[in-house]
Structure formats: C-alpha cells, structure tokens
Amino acid sequence: MSFLRYLDLVVLALALPVFLLAGFPLLGWGAAAVAWCVQRALQLRLDRAARHSQDLRRVAGITAGSMIGRGWLTALTIFAAGLKENDAGLSAAVLVVVLFTVYFAITLTLRPFDTKELPS
C-alpha cells in the first residue's frame, strides 16, 4: 500500500503527455513539477525531523512551518510562471490543485493504516 503514497507523482508524470497533446504551455507543467517535487521532498525531510523530536512544541513548529512554507513555495512558483506567461500560471495552478487533491485523498484514505506513534 505504500506505493499509493506516491500516486500524486504518478499523476504528475501522466500530466506531461496531456500537456503535450493538448498544447498547454510546458512552462506550466515544469513550474508545477518543480514546485510539487521540491515541496514533497521538503515535506519528507521535515516530517522525519518532526518524528524524531521528543519536544511537542518543536513538532508543532516544524509541522506548521512546513505546511505554511511549502504552500508559499508552491504559490510563488506558480505566480512566477504566470508572470512569465499567463497561460503557464493558470495551467500550473490547475495541475497543482489536481495533484493536491490526489495527495490529500490518498493521505486521508491511508491515515488509519499508519502505525506511527506520537512522541510521549
């Protein structure tokens, strides 16, 4: 079941042929791909740091900071693509919304199967 955790990355890869066939701007796909992959890598790294911390305030700080920072990173990347080319910004934003929807649905679905315990 752990392969489902990366379904959003599969959707991202499958979006490339859609962008090519539909004639959508590749800058939009590229911006969404870079932003999504960087924020996912940051998430994995910061989640690992939070899991290894015994201080609940530190865990809350890492988790909240991670969510806010990754959101800003993604938004600014989309904004930059939109400044370069309007359609690229729009296509990047739509792709990120689709990726987030897939990621969020899978996360909620797999949450009951997580065996990780919170620090005491």
Image (tube, grey):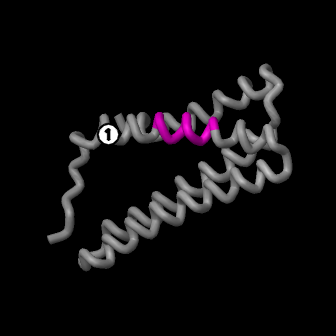
In front of the other: 95 or 13 = 95
Task: Residue 26: give x, y in percent of width and height.
Answer: 81, 37
Picture layout, residue 90 above or below residue 65: above
Instruction: Return the residue found at the far top.
Output: 21
- Magenta includes 80? no
Position of the N terminus by quadrant: top left
Specify whether 46 is left or right of 107: right
Picture layout, residue 87 above or below residue 20: below
Q: Which amino acid does the dot numbered 1 rest on?
A: Leu
Task: Residue 19: give x, y in percent of width and height.
Answer: 75, 28
Task: Residue 54: give x, y in percent of width and height.
Answer: 24, 77
Q: Residue at x 84, y 45 (%)?
A: 85
Q: Tell me which secondary structure the magenta stretch mostly adopts.
A: helix
Specify whether 104 is left or right of 111: right
Q: Residue at x 73, y 25 (%)?
A: 17
Specify whether 97 is left or right of 62: right
Magenta part of the protein: which range? 94-102
Which residue matches tag 1?
A: 108
User: How many badges with numbers are in the image?
Assistant: 1
In front of the other: 77 or 87 = 87
Task: Residue 60: give x, y in percent of width and height.
Answer: 32, 70
